[in-house]
Image (cartoon, rainbow, N blue to C red):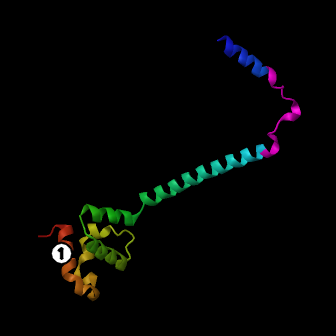
Amino acid sequence: MNLVFWTAILGQLGTPKPRPGDWQFGWAGVGMVAAAATVIVFVIWLIFRFLAVRERRTSNSPWLLFKDLATAHGLGHRERQLLRRLAQQYRLEQPAALFIEAAWWEDERLGPAWAKRQPEIEKLRRRLFAIR
């Protein structure tokens, strides 16, 4: 203990006291700290803004609802593609309407362009609306 005490005392005796002009931190150091703080705040702001936009996009996305309904019904890629093309043909604001309203699936509404895919459409319609 005695050795530690004397070492500390001798260490303090050798260092001169700082004088007002001896400081090395100056205005350049203050500028660097301010710039670093500004960058950190800006990056945090960007992250929060990105997360808010992403949340808004996913919480009100008709196509995300469409995708979730297709997943819930266990539809494969080909069936999803067929439904997506139907929704785009009708220019539906809410493509999920294809899962709710059977009127979109009527032959007269589909038109002659879909005649070639009619068996596939009918099979999918029966599956979605549980028609026996």
User: Looking at the image, which residue is at 70% across and 14% down?
Assistant: 5
In which quadrant will I find the N terminus?
A: top right
122 or 36: nearer the eye?
36
User: Looking at the image, which residue is at 68% across and 14% down?
Assistant: 3
User: Looking at the image, which residue is at 81% across and 44% down?
Assistant: 27
Q: Residue 77, relative to residue 8: is it above or below?
A: below
Q: Residue furthest top?
A: 2
- Residue 11 picture location, percent across and down: 75, 22
Left or right of residue 31: residue 20: right
In which quadrant will I find the C terminus?
A: bottom left
Left or right of residue 48: residue 72: left
> Which residues make up the magenta segment?
13-28
Left or right of residue 47: residue 35: right
103 or 71: nearer the eye?
71
User: Looking at the image, which residue is at 80% across and 46% down?
Assistant: 28
Q: Residue 78, relative to residue 115: is it above or below?
A: above
Q: Residue furthest front?
A: 3
Label 1: element kind:
helix
Tell whether position 65 is magenta: no
Q: Residue furthest bottom?
A: 112
- Residue 86 picture location, percent across and down: 31, 77
- Residue 49 picture location, percent across and down: 55, 54
- Residue 63 picture location, percent across and down: 38, 67
Left or right of residue 70: residue 50: right
Tell whether position 19 is magenta: yes
Local packing at callout 1 (Cα closer than 10 Å; few below 14, some 14-19, many 20+) is: few
Q: Give the residue at mark 1.
A: 123
* Three-letter amino acid code at the position of disc 1: Lys
